[in-house]
Image (cartoon, helix red, strand yellow):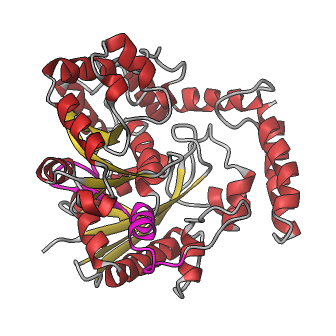
Amino acid sequence: MAFFNFYDTETTGLEWGYDNILQFSAIRTDEDFNVVSSVNLRGRPFPWVIPHPAAMLTTGIGPKQIFAQSMSQYDLVKEIAAHFKANTPAINIGFNSIGYDELMLRAAFFQTLHPMYITQRGDNSRADVMLLAQAVAEHDTQALKVNLNGKGKPCFRLTDLAEANGLSCANAHDAMGDTTMTIALANFLREKSPRIYGAMMNCRNKENAAQTLFEEPYLLHTDRAFKVPTIFCTAVMQIGSDAILADLTIDPSTYLGADVATLLKLMTKQPRAFRVVKLNSFPTLIPTTPDAAGMIEPVMAAWVQLLKSQTFRENLAVALTKRYPDKEPDAYVERRMYNGFPTPDDERRMADFHGSEGLAYEVFDSLDLNEIARRLRDDDYAASLRKRLASTEKQPWLTISAAKAELVECRERFKASPPALFDEIADYLNALEAEIS
């Protein structure tokens, strides 16, 4: 039997690496969404992190309650890591979890010396109810009601989808409330659109998604990041966790005989004949037929000719690896979690770190891991990091001056919020400024 691990986080803000998790809630269910167990955890942020006023006004939880929590950020993330390990294997699933919560979790695991990919390894897989809802809305239009936002575009926020489809929105913006809402929406989508639900769940890990790609000759792929979200396509090749799809509605004649340099130029122009999909990120891949897509025979014939060319395929593979220039490592350790995997020795040291309060923080091969360990073990060093909050220059982290400016901007946006909460946030920022100065 497959088990789901539905979860949600509430955070100090939206910037992975620089913001922290304040609440983590999870509900384990069976494949029919019957609750098996649940957990609800809260903790404080790191001493060098300021909660965003907008985040506090959204949840209605002010700094007094945030900093009164008994668990530190380190202890909170340690409990979160333990939860995922104890509930392996499972389908780890949330709402916008792959695009947001997963990044926050990885950054939190990295900054507390836990394995970053707990949610994917050990026979775990991942799904995202927001992506599922977008797929249903695109491919089974009568199954889901989607309201339009102020710009006339479909709105895929959790509470909006729940309200539009008659589901409870109780305790919105609380991690446990949002997790409960996500389960209800997932159940609704399964009942209303079993075909799309099944196709999406079949792509919950890289292996299954790749199997779908290369066993089904024709697919509909949807990605709302593009101006034209859905394309009629076929798989061209797989490179690691990425797959290259060919948009079969576009005449590929300009690609015939193209060298690597020409392909690089063509790949940036509209319309794009190729799209890269991440197989480990719950892609939308819906099997279809040429007749259903209304294909034109000459275009199909041109694609057959192009994709048979070994020279073209080799040039395309090279071009795809050169799409983006190499980036310099980020200046701050908070954003360096993708700078390579830990060595086997460092993985062992990371595990040992949590079992021994006396383990020195200079023991890692990685300088980044040594920096993180120092922040966790050296109280004086951690306190010194608070001084950077007083900066009046623009920084990637939230400074006191930036937080005060944000609070002013929030007075119009959050007019319905209690005035006492605004005052509490202002008092906190003033006290923090006095302490650091």
Task: For the C terminus, give its image quadrant.
Answer: top right
User: Magenta stretch?
Assistant: 118-145
Task: For the N terminus, give its image quadrant.
Answer: bottom left
The verdict on residue 407 being magenta is no
Query: Which is more toward the observer, 108 or 148?
Result: 148
Left or right of 177: which side holds 92? Answer: left
Q: Quadrant of residue 94?
A: bottom left
The percent coordinates of residue 193 (x first, y second) are 34, 78
Q: How many marks?
A: 0
Q: Is residue 112 above or below residue 10?
A: above
The percent coordinates of residue 293 (x first, y second) are 32, 58
Query: Which is more toward the observer, 203 or 219?
Result: 219
Left or right of 70: which side holds 349? Answer: left
Query: Which is more toward the observer, 358 or 94?
Result: 94
The percent coordinates of residue 424 (x first, y second) are 82, 59
Q: Quadrant of residue 322?
A: top left
Give the residue drawn at x 37%, y 11%.
Answer: 261
Left or right of 44: which side holds 296? Answer: left
Q: Is residue 141 above or below residue 115?
A: below
Q: Quadrant of residue 47?
A: top right
Left or right of 96: which side holds 66? Answer: right
- Note whether residue 36 is visible: yes
Q: Is residue 437 above or below residue 426?
A: above
The percent coordinates of residue 77 (x first, y second) are 41, 51
- Note whether residue 169 is visible: no
Give the residue drawn at x 27%, y 27%.
Answer: 341
